[in-house]
Every structure is written in structure tokens, then in C-alpha cells.
Amino acid sequence: MKAAVGGYARARDLRHALELLSSADGMGRVLAGGQSLVAALNMRLTTGDILVDISALADCRGVADDGGTLRIGALTRHAEIGRDPLVRAHAPLLAEAVGHIAHAAIRNRGTIGGAIAHADPAAEFPACALALGAVMRVEGLDGPRDIPVEAFFRDTFETALAEGEILTAISVPKAAPGEVQVIQEVARRSGDYALAGLCLVRRAGRHRLALFSTGPKPMLATAAMAALDGGDTEAAISALKAEIDPPSDTQASGAYRRHLAGVLLRRAVARIEGGTR
Amino acid sequence: MTIAFGNPDRPNSYIGKTVPRPNAPRLVQGRGRFVDDITLPRMAHVAFVRSPYAHARIGGIDAAAAKAVKGVLRVFTGADIAEVCTPWVAVLAHLKGLKSPPQHALATDRATWVGEPVAAVLATTRAAAEEAASLVEVAYEALPVVTDMMSALDETTPVIHPDLGDNLAFRRLHDEGDVEGAFAGAHAVVSARFRTARHTGVTLEPRSILVDWNPAEGQLVAWHATQAPHMMQTVLAKHLALPESRVRVICGDVGGSYGIKVHVYPDEVATAAIAKIMGRPVKFVADRLESFTTDIHARDHIVDARLAVDEAGRILAFDVDDWTAIGPYSVYPRTSAIEGNQVVNLCGGPYDFANYRARTTVVFQNKTPTCQYRAVGHPIAVAITEGLVDMAAAELGMDPVEIRRRNLYADDAYPATSPAKMRFEGLSHHASLDKLVALMDYDALRADQAAARKRGVHRGIGIASFIELTNPSPFMYGIGGARISAQDGCTVRMDPDGSVVALSGVTEQGQGTEAMLAQIVAEGVGVSPSEVRVVTGDTQVTPYGGGTWASRGAGIGGEAALQAARALRDSILEVAAAMLQSEPGRLDIRAGAVVDPDTGEERLSLAELGRIVYFRGDTLPKGLPRELVQTRHFITSEYPFAFTNGVQASYLEVDVETGVVTLLKHWCVEDCGRIVNPQLVDEQIRGGIVQGLGGALYEEIHYDEEGQLLNGSMADYLVPMAAETPDMIVGHVETPTKESLLGAKGAGEAGTAGAPAAVMNAINDALRPLGAQVTEMPFTPERILRALGAIED
Ligand SMILES: Cc1cc2nc3c(=O)[nH]c(=O)nc-3n(C[C@H](O)[C@H](O)[C@H](O)COP(=O)(O)OP(=O)(O)OC[C@H]3O[C@@H](n4cnc5c(N)ncnc54)[C@H](O)[C@@H]3O)c2cc1C
């Protein structure tokens, strides 16, 4: 199928990008790595978009040490995240997640900002951001604002980004001493979106458990987290299964996904306790 | 005329060796010429308006908005096309009782599946055609939809084609021996319901056609991604009311076909009709999304089957009840009854037993039509047969290899006729199984499996013996009245520079046909393969032939090439003998030169011979025949089909908590007769296995009850990728067919035939100690966990 695009412009800098978006009369669409958007255009799932290509915005790319946090530019590619020494040292969850995202060609172009702004409920990075307690750095013509991750994901493909805003960076707290971060998922084939997956972070004895591909958006399993904080893995598994309501599709039923979430949690706990899986 | 195939050091010994594919550099350098690469002056593009309903009456078609799109040339309805194009009915006389209604290139009054073309938009660009197609408004009146296979014949189910009376397309019962008696007296009976999912072929290059009608010449030329150009020539001529001689089908590079591109598709015929109406070239290239709803589907079967054995594990009887649903039409011209018919022909195929009953029931429904796809019917028949054999072995506490040894046809039992009345010229089941067992180190694998089990790791070994139908005679289609050639021809000529051109009726789909032909001709004439240029896929140029299907390229086309090459060799030697004042029998051709056969000493280069023949013919004796062009045709005559055989094994691990299957290794030993090119054969086997693995683990087209296709994209219809593919070890036994000098049978479908059964048996081997069993493909993680009872709904 041939895409039906309304227009294309390459932004010189952030300001230019925001102006282009605001002059597009509601039809503006940020183009980052294009790994989700171009596929949607080519299937005519969206038509008439005026594409604002932000891929040349150098300020929005790369990882910086901000003291207590890492500032990851929205345009940092998946592959770059996977090999970045700061990420590997201070947010290893993100580096591990990269191995589960798509294939090399897609990881070379796809951006973390694109993945988070796209808000696919089956994507890894949104759940990682949630598990890590990240903050989304957003820029509009009226200036910047910060959105805590808990308030960012609203529904399938829906976020707190307002019309005309651009996600510029993601700030993640650096891992505390002794902190462990793991991601577990099952996909039908290597590189496929997960049938179900989860990110588990243990920071100073407290747990954060973020699920993906088990509902309309990534979610924190708070009841399971409480049980984990209390040291009861079996109770956490039961709580997890009770607090998710996964969808059914042609790949798997909700019941299978619920079962899988329990298996993955047991494996994740085993890993943070020094097991091998 | 004999060739010492057994001697690898014989002169010109290209047959049996891996020689480079002549078209590989061109393809990897991006210099292939696929239909989509061809642009003609005044060429226009067609896009189709497709039914969003599985069954609906077509009311008015409002094209006003579509016509307003810039670049649109014309919008066509079914009635417009019907004025120049007659409908077709896909039945064959030898498939008794098969019925199907007339099918139009564009639906005229009713749409019968989601994706059926109902209107066409012609525009100067594909984008404009698509844009306009989305603006065509069709008034549909929804009609009752039939989607379920097993209730399609129920009284309460609506009849899709009232003129046909019911939803039954075809039924065949084959009954041999005393099945009931055998079951009554059996020591053990095992039974199961098997299910193979609806698949499609997912060719890398989608279906493509470019048609030019030249009224001045009265000729229609179609550049077509097809397996069977001569068949298409007939079809286009017949339905567009042209003489066959005025239709030329050219088939250049084709990006994979797997059977998908051997059928007649309404949108492709409509493209030809539009070209004829408009008097200008029209191109249609299916996009990936429309491919999912319009390329043929296959393999949608539900089978209840049982097997009776005695206490020694000897097979007493098979009883098979196969059901399949084929969509709303039998597909033209090969028909959609063949797959079910093959299941009846092939169940129990490797085994020597007496009592056999098999029935296939083929019904209509409102889904994409199904038809022949790589290994037609084989993966289903092999899954049924081998699944039951393993269940019987388990029931008797017998090793799966042992039960097969007790039942396979003995290697000296040939010729033999199976209870399904299939005739076998010569197979090698035991030699193949022995080789497989050695290759996989069966005992060591069993030890590894036992050790893994102790660690709580569940591994399984699955074996699947199979037969494969290749080299078909006219018994496949011709006797049923279809103009589909089982014969194939080859013309071989020597040019003045001593190089050779071979024109063949079999076609190149990416599988290496041209390499195979080049090396056969090279050996047959006595030149290097690089001196042979091969031309295939042009009905106005090559000898008439069948093309690519039913694994016939090497066995039929290769033999024609060999005979033509040998005939050319004889002609060359006759001239050479005159020039050298020798005798043809005292000369040979080696590496492009006429030589003394005893010493190998060069007497005359072919280039010099060519110079004399073509430019100084005056110096040759008057009346000396100097026909450096020879044509030969070949058709099998002793056996309706050349059966091949083989056996596969799978080793895998099942994660019993997640249901995920990890393939560890796969083996195949097969016997395709003479191997012309070991690498090409191994690639065919491997590629075929991967397609079979897809069927076993991933591929399944889902529909909802309204007949909407739910997973029609590469994101949702999963095909196996490199990361999922295990190492595959391929071995061979060679039992050449005696029907030809070459002795080659087919190898294109063996991998696909056996792989799903091997994987199924391996999964069940892993699950058996846990009391679980799966027989519904694909074996998704969820199906495996459900079999284990691990999921609470
Ligand atoms: C075959 C395939 C498999 C894949 N598998 C996975 C997988 O397993 N897991 C996974 O997580 N992803 C997967 N992806 C998606 C991939 O990770 C994408 O790269 C990612 O979802 C989007 O990033 P992008 O930079 O390509 O964004 P784009 O495609 O350019 O944009 C996506 C959306 O986000 C918006 N957007 C992008 N950047 C910004 C920004 N800075 N501010 C505001 N809005 C923005 C765009 O307007 C658009 O709506 C897969 C993709 C493909 C093609």
C-alpha cells in the first residue's frame, strides 16, 4: 500500500520543530525513528499527517549523567541504549530490555522517545520507565514541563503529551547500591512483542513491578509489590494474577497471559535473589 | 546411451556436483528483473476494491468520488469486466462429483469472501489508484455467512451457492480390505483428532502481473510472476476470447511461489481484461495486506483418525475421516479438491499394511479460497500417520524407531502398490531410517533426554517417515480435462562461439531451476556450465511445458534437457567426425572441445567447429546434417507419479511452565533419486523444513465468525525466522527412477511434508511423562499449556 502523507519537514532545532507542529493545524506528527509510524503510514492506518522529522535534533540524543539521575535524550536509538556504559551501570534494566526489542535493523533506527511516546502496551521501554520511576521531559511552545511516569501513560497509544508537545528526554534515577533490575518476557518469536512481560526492580528492599502486554497500558502491580516487600513470593504471584486483566487476541488468551505473568514473576524473583533464569 | 553417474571422475561430471547458480550474482546485486521492475510506455496501475464482507449482495457502485481523484483513468465493475472476460468453473472430470459455481474476475452480484475483488480502479499511479479505490462506494447487503467447517453440511446452515444445492464441493471415500474386521480384532487401537491450521504461502515477491494488449498485432503479452506460463497462456486466451497463439506469457525472475503462483487469480485475470479494454499496459502488484486475503490459503483440515495394531506393533488398519473447507469457490484450474484427495492417497504411505479406509469431505465456506500449496496434503497425511504410529508405539511400550522398522515397506519390496493404490517404483525407507538414526546418534540423544529429564528439563525426540509425490504424469490434471502439461521440453543449441543456449519449459522461481538445467546441459553436451545460458519462462520462445509444480523441474524438465543435450552432442560429433575424418563413436566432447576419448587430446574446439558450420559451411561435405539445435520432450509413462521417500527427526525442548517450544536440532534423510546439485537439493530440503516448522509452531490464519480475517499482516501471521530455525542436518539415499536416463525425482516438498509431524511427535515425546498430548497445529505455547492443564480460565 502507498502511504498518503500530508507533508514532510525536517526540523533544524527544537524550536523549529515545535513551530512546525503548531503550524500544521492539528495534522502535525513527530517522526523520530519511524519504526512504528512509517509502518502505520504504509498500512494507511493514518493518512494526511504532516510529518515533522526531529531526527536531526542533536540536543535530544545521547545519555548524560545528571548527578542522581541519567538524562536519556528522546532520540537515543535502542541500539545505543543497549551499549551505553552509563545506562549499563546505572539503569541496567534498559540495556537488558533492548535485547528483547525487535531486530537489529529496527533497534538501529527506533528511538526510546518514540517507543515511549507511541505507548504501545506491549512495548518494553514504557514498562521499564514505569518500573524505574522515570520522569518524562516534555517541551511545548509554552516551555518545558516534567511528567512523572505514573501520570504519563493513559491508554493504548495514549499519553499525557499534549498536542504540539515533544518528548525531549527521559530522566531515570540511578540505581541505588545493591539495587537489582530484571526484565522477563515471553514472545512467540525472537523480536516479537511479548505475549506478557514484566520489569522487577528492588531498590533498598522495596519492589517496583511493572507489567507490559497485560492490559491497555503498562501498569504497576501494587498489590504484588506489597507482597514482595513482605517477602512472600507466592502471595505476590496470586496478587499479581488478581490485579491484571489481560486481553485475548490471536496469539494468546487473557487466561494464558495471566498464567504467564505468574511464571514470569517467579522467575524474576529467582533472578533478583541470585538465581540464573 | 548411458552416463557413468557412479564415477565422479568421469568427464564433464557436473551432474551430482554443486555448481554455482548462474542467476545468483544478478539477484544478490539487485539486478533481478521482477514484474514490478518492468515499466512500459503508457503503463497504468490497477488497484482493487475488495469486499469487506464475507458474504454480501452487491448493490449499486458509486464511483463518482473515485473518478475525481487526479490520475484516475477509469473505474470498472464486475459487469464491465464480464463483457470481455468469461467466468470459469474449477472442476476436473476425474475428481468425480466435484462442483463449483462459475467465478468472475470481478464479483458481479455477490461477494463471497472478505477480499474478493468487486471493482477495479485504473490510474496513472498506484497511489492514485489506491486512493480512488478507497473512495468507491459499494452498497452491500450482508448475507448469512458460513465459516464453520464441520457444520457446513448441516440442514440449518445456509447454502452459499443455492444453485449447487448444498455446501458440499467434493467427497471421496476409499475403502480397501476389511477395516472394521481389523479394528475388531486388533490388539490395540489408538485414535485422535488432528487439526492443521489455515496457512498461506507468504512469498517474498507478492503476486504480480503486467499485461499489454497490442491491438495492432492482435497480441496480448503478460509479464507474470507465475509458475506455469503455458497454463496461463491457455487461461488468458480462453477467457478473453483470444487464440492461444496470440497470448504470450513471460515469466522473468520470480521471488518465490510455493504453489501460491500456480493458480488463476480473479484480480490478475481482471488486470488482463482491463489491459485489453484500454489498449494500454496495466500493472497489478498485490500488496502484503491484500495478499493475506487473496493469495490462496491451504491446509485447513480437521481429521479424526485411528490406527489398529497387533501385539507385535504391526499395523493392521488405518481409518481416516478428513474434513476441509475451501472457501466459496474451487480454485481454477487445478481445483481445490486435490488437497483432500491427497490426504486420502497418502495416509499410511510408508507402511506395508492391508486395510485402509479414508474419506475426505470438502466443503464451501465464506473465507479466502484454498488450493495447492507446497507439499499439497502431505503435511496433513504425514501428521495423521506418524502421530498415530507414535501413539501406538507408546501404547505398546515400543520404541518409535522400532515400530517403524516393523512396518515400513522393505527396501526390496518394490514395485509395490499401497492400500491407497499408490504405485511405488523403488523406495528406501529402511536405508533412510538407518542413516537418520546414525546421523542423529539416536541412542546418545535418548541418553541426553533422560539426563535432562532428571534436571526437570523436558526434551523430546520425534520421528516422521514420509512419501512424497513428484514427477506427475497426466494422471494429476490432464486426464481431468485441464490443459496443464505434464510433459516438458528443452531446446539446446550451439552458437558459433561454441557456447550453448538451453530453452526450457520449466521455470525459475528462485529455487535454482536454471542452475540445475545448466549443469545437466553442460554434462550432456560436454561444455562447462558457464558456457550454457538458460532461457525459461516465455511461451513464445521455450518449448511447451508445465512449469514448476509437484516437484517436477529436475525429474521432467531436467530429463528433457539431458536428452536434448545428448542429441546436440551427437549432432556436433557427426559434424566433427566429418571434419576430422573420424567417426562420432571415436570422439567425445569435453570442456568445450572435441577430443580423443582415450587420450583426452583436443582435436577441435567447439568454437572452431562453430566457425566452420556457421560461416564456412561450404567446406563441409554436401548433405552433411548440421543441425546444431535439438529439442526433446519428456513425459513419464510407467508410473502416474514418481514417489520419493524420506524420514525426519526433531529434537526439542518444551518449557512446561510457559509452553514455549525451543527447537534444538532437526534432521532429514531423503531419497529424491539422482541428485543433480547437492546444494540446491539441501536448500530445498531446508527451506521446506522451515515452512513445515512454520506449520507446526507458528502459522495460523484466524477468522472470526463473521468471516473477518483477524491476523492478515506479517506482524500477526507468524512465519519462522532465522532465530527460531534450528540447525538442520540433511542426508541422502539415492534410488534413481528407471523411467529416465537422469533418474531424478523431486525434492521440493519433502521438507515441508515431514517437518510438522516430526515436531508434533517430539513435543508429545516430551510431554508424555506428564500425561499430555497435542494434535492441533500450530502448537502454540497456550495449546501446550492447555494440554498440560496448566491454565485456569
Ligand atoms: C517488526 C517490528 C518489531 C518491533 N518489535 C518491538 C518490540 O518487540 N518491542 C518494542 O518495544 N518495540 C518494537 N517495535 C517498535 C520499535 O521499538 C519502534 O522503534 C518504537 O515503537 C517507536 O520508535 P521510533 O523512534 O521509531 O518512533 P516513530 O515511529 O518515529 O514514532 C512513533 C510515534 O511516536 C511519536 N513520537 C516519536 N518520537 C516522539 C517524541 N520525541 N515526542 C513526541 N512524540 C514522538 C510519533 O509521532 C509517532 O506517533 C517494533 C517495530 C517493528 C517494525
Image: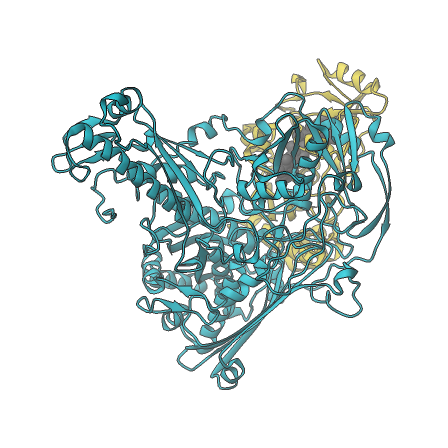
Chain colours: A yellow, B cyan
Task: Say whether residue A37 is visible.
Answer: no
Residue B135 in the figure: left or right of residue B793 = right
Judge whether B2 appears above or below B757 on screen.
above
Between A40 and A217, the one lying in front of the other is A40
Q: Nearer the viewer, residue B312 or A81?
A: B312
To which quarter of the image does residue B569 belong? top left
- Residue shown at 47% from the left, 26% from the top: B29
x, y (%) of residue B58? 84, 47
Residue B69: in sight, yes or no?
yes
Q: Residue furthest front?
A: B622
Q: Where is residue B393 in the image (x, y as percent from the top left)?
A: 44, 73
The image position of residue B219, as x and y in percent, is 61, 31
- At a point 36% along the width and 46% down the height, the residue shown is B559
Residue B489 is left or right of residue A80, and the answer is left
Residue A169's image quarter?
Answer: top right
Q: Residue furthest bottom?
A: B185
Q: Which of B762 and B565 is in front in this view?
A: B565
Q: How many labels does the image show?
A: 0
Q: Which residue lies furthest to the left in this view?
A: B599
**Ligand 1 located in image quadrant:** top right
Foreground residue, B239 or B342? B239
Query: Toward which corner of the image does residue B282 lie, by quadrant?
Result: top right
Find residue B351 and report its horizontal and vertical position in percent.
42, 70
| Residue at 34 percent of width and 45 percent of height | B676
Placement of the C terminus of chain B among the 4 image quadrants = bottom right
